[in-house]
Amino acid sequence: MKRPKILIIYTGGTIGMIKNENGVLLPFSLDNLLNDIPLLKMFPADIHSVGLDNLIDSSDADIGFWLLLNNIIADNYDIFDGFVILHGSDTMAYTASALSFLLENLSKPVILTGSQLPIGLLRTDGRENIIASIELACMQKNGKPLIQEVCLYFEDHLYRGNRTNKYSAENFDAFISPNYPLLANVGTEIKVFEENFLLSNNDLFVSHKNLCNEVAIIKLFPGIQSKTIKSITEISGLKGIVLETYGSGNAPTNNDIINCFKEAIAKGIIILNVTQCTVGKVQQGKYETSTKLREIGIVSGGDMTTEAALTKLMFLLGKNYTREECIKILTTPLRGEMSY
Ligand code: ASP
């Protein structure tokens, strides 16, 4: 079996942070981080690493940051067998989702991981997370990488990246994949669930270069006023909205509110409906309170997470698709981000 070549990309996040003189956590250097894991040198793999010039807390992630990561992977795609991205957990599910759309026809793993406690602390969860992620990235079958998609690894679990959501600010087990099963479970043994993997189509790898951030998220709440919605739908240049609705895709039937959405759609804005519930999917037309949404042209996001819905919208709006093409792709699984 060929000795795998793995590239670790360090972006910042708690995993590599140390406290400054005021006790505030800030990202520190990659060397510092890797020195804390001497075991890495014993891995049966060629491990290389690169740190971003500008290390960030992942709260500072933006489309420029995603495109930079995308380019690093694309530039090194032919050289390495797998990629492990060390990333802050706060927006890791967004980055994993964005990369899943930008990197098309992957035949190698891209695994995002991080930690809730810095690597320098005795009780850190970072060491196990990095080691298991590298081990997963090294797995092969018939001489090829076993995992061929963008994943997120945290506390024993490998998830499809664009199905995840950070649900805990405290637990080591900080992520969930509410609508899609695990890709692997790491205990005394690594159990991979190949039946849940994205099927590679053997087409040529493509790294897409555009994302559009003329988008917004509107989360409904009882008592929301049409003027609040209007203040968003009237933003100049806005192209897309992720609408977080109730239950199976329901919204107030109040005419003023419906008219705001109607006017936005008439201006060409795409509105994508996802549920505020953690588990389950949007079914426009199940209740009267969602029938109107369908009638005026709001698009159902099925069981996509907000993270996947937003980044899919950014990805599609960054292309020269017509409205119809965008809607068709939004309602069809592109990278396993939604169920049929
Ligand atoms: N604020 C940190 C970040 O997302 C939290 C973490 O890494 O877990 O960068």
Image (cartoon, grey):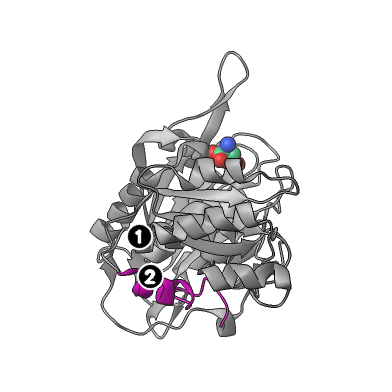
Residue 152 point in image, percent of width and height:
55, 60
**Mark earlier in primary sequence (1, 2):** 1
- In front: 52, or 3? 52
Mark 1 Cα shell of 10 Å, populated few (<14), some (14-19), many (≥20): many
- In front: 265, or 203? 265
Q: Which residue is mark 2?
A: 326
111 relative to 33, above or below: below
Question: Where's the C terminus, which quadrant?
Answer: bottom right
Tell me: 150 left or right of 21: left
Query: In which quadrant of this rendering is ligand 1 seen?
Result: top right
Task: Give me the residue at 50% from left, 35% from top.
Answer: 57
Whether residue 334 is in magenta: the answer is yes
Q: Kindly tell me whether residue 110 is visible in this rendering.
A: yes
Residue 284 point in image, percent of width and height:
63, 74
From the Cβ of disc 2, is ligand 1 less than 8 Å away? no
- Range drawn in magenta: 322-340
Q: Which residue is mark 1?
A: 317
